[in-house]
């Protein structure tokens, strides 16, 4: 059995025991399945539809589902999915937990990101779609579709991940330089 199957089995057992991790009708009815598809692209049909909705049926929301990318790459995954606020929060919470306690406590951040990243991404997408709809309320269906297709928030951003990587490298270099000036001589 693979790690993914093991983690999915654990999630299913939690769902069976508590019965609260599947939510019915936890979505805004003004956001349609087509809106999600046009906003996210082919990733919706290939991946997120089955992660967000029980048995892939629109309208039966799941609270948790495992996202391996979010589990292993935590804040970088949030940046990749254009959720900068969550990326910053997870990054700083991880740094504080690791500094205050120890490295193994940082695993909590990985578990949180892995099991709740998909749900947070769903909420992010719905909020972005609602903003687009509210910004242009009298738009025709085809124009609305084009706004969703062209929205930069819906597509993954490698550029933002690379910029984040560069900022982290710069921060490490500055810290190393500071350490050298104050303690290295």
Image (cartoon, grey):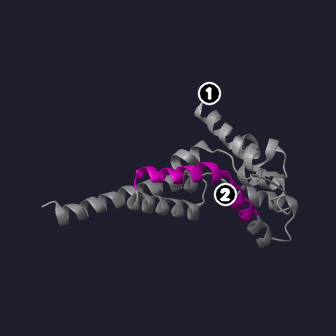
On the rendered image, what quadrant is the C terminus found in? bottom left
Q: Quadrant of residue 126?
A: bottom right
Residue bearing the label numbered 1: 1
**Image: magenta residue range:** 102-129
The disc, 2 or 1, on the residue closer to the chain's N-terminal end is 1
Residue 51 is situated, as x and y percent measured from the top left of the image, at 72, 45
Q: Is residue 17 above or below residue 3?
A: below
Q: Residue furthest front?
A: 17
Between 127 and 118, the one nearer to me in the picture = 118
x%, y% of residue 89? 53, 64
Regarding mark 2 in the picture, which secondary structure is present there? helix
Could you tell me residue 71's position as x and y percent? 56, 46
Which is nearer the eye, 122 or 55?
Answer: 55
Q: Residues within 10 Å of mark 1 (few under 14, many from 20)?
A: few
Front of the two marks 2 and 1: 1
Q: Is residue 103 magenta?
A: yes
């Amino acid at each position: 059995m693979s790690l993914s199957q093991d983690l999915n089995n654990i999630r299913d057992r939690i769902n069976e025991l508590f019965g609260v991790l599947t939510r019915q009708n936890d979505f805004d009815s003004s956001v349609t399945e087509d809106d999600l598809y046009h906003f996210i692209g082919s990733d919706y049909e290939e991946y997120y539809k089955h992660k967000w909705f029980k048995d892939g049926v629109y309208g039966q929301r799941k609270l948790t589902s495992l996202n391996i990318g979010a589990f292993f790459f935590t804040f970088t995954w949030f940046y990749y999915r254009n959720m900068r606020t969550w990326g910053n929060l997870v990054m700083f919470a991880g740094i504080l937990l690791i500094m205050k306690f120890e490295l193994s406590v940082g695993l909590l951040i990985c578990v949180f990101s892995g099991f709740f990243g998909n749900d947070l991404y769903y909420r992010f997408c719905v909020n972005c779609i609602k903003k687009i709809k509210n910004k242009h309320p009298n738009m025709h269906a085809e124009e609305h579709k084009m706004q969703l297709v062209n929205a930069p928030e819906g597509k993954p951003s490698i550029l933002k991940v690379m910029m984040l990587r560069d900022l982290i490298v710069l921060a490490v270099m500055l810290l190393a330089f500071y350490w050298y000036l104050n303690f290295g001589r």
